[in-house]
Image (spheres, rainbow, N blue to C red):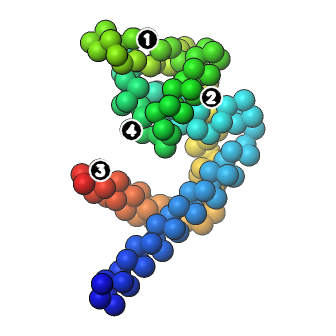
Amino acid sequence: MTRRETDRVQISADAWEALYRAQVTVMRRLQRQPEFAELTAREFDVLFNLSRSAEGGMRLNELNEYVLLTQSSLSRMLERLELKGLVHRWQDPQDLRGLRIRLTDSGRAVQVQIAEQFRVHVHELMSAGLDPEEMVILTRLSDRLRQAVSSL
C-alpha cells in the first residue's frame, strides 16, 4: 500500500470512529431520559421501524435490515415486546417459514408518545454541537454514505 493509500485508509478509519463515537455519546444521553425507563432505546428503535410499515406489518428479515441486532436477538426482543402487548407476530401466509410483525394499538400509542419526547431530546443534543445548516449537511452525508454502502 502506498503512503497516499495508507493516509486515505487512516482518514476513513478516523471518520468512522468519530461518527461512531458521536452516535454512542448521543445514544447514551438519550437512554438516560425518563421515557426509556420502561422501554430500551433498542426496543424503541424496533417500534419506530414497525411504525413505518404498512398495515400488513413487516417480515422479520425486513425488520432485521433496519436494526443493529442479530436475527436471534431480534426474535427474543420481539417475544418480550409481544408479552408487553406492544407487537403482534403471526405466521406469514405467503411463506409459512416466516413471521410478520406489526404494532398493536398499544404499541403504536407507546411509540408515538416516546417519539414526541425523543425528537425534542435529539434536537437538544444535536443543536448543542451543530447549527441547522450543519445538521442538513450531516443528514445529506449520512444518507449518501448509507446509500453507497447499501449498493455494494
Element type at mark 1 = strand
Observer-side mark, 2 or 3, equals 3
Q: What amino acid is labelled 3 in the image? A: Ser
Circle 1 crowding by C-alpha within 10 Å: few under 14, some 14–19, many from 20? few
Tag 4 residue = 65
Number of the label disc, if any, that sits on residue 90:
1
Q: What amino acid is labelled 2 in the image? A: Gln
Q: Earlier in the sequence, mark 4 or mark 3?
A: 4
Q: Residue at x 46, y 27 (%)?
A: 51
Residue 128 at x, y percent in the picture: 63, 63
Q: Earlier in the sequence, mark 4 or mark 2?
A: 4
Residue 40 at x, y percent in the picture: 65, 36
Tag 2 residue = 113
Q: Earlier in the sequence, mark 4 or mark 1?
A: 4
Q: Earlier in the sequence, mark 1 or mark 2?
A: 1
Q: Residue at x 59, y 52 (%)?
A: 123
Number of the label disc, if any, that sits on residue 150:
3
Element type at mark 3 = helix
Q: Earlier in the sequence, mark 2 or mark 3?
A: 2
Reply above or below: 14 against 71. below
Please state if 48 lies on the left or on the right of 144 as rendered.
right
Question: Can residue 98 be seen from the camera position used here?
Answer: yes
Q: CA distance from mark 4 to mark 1?
A: 19 Å
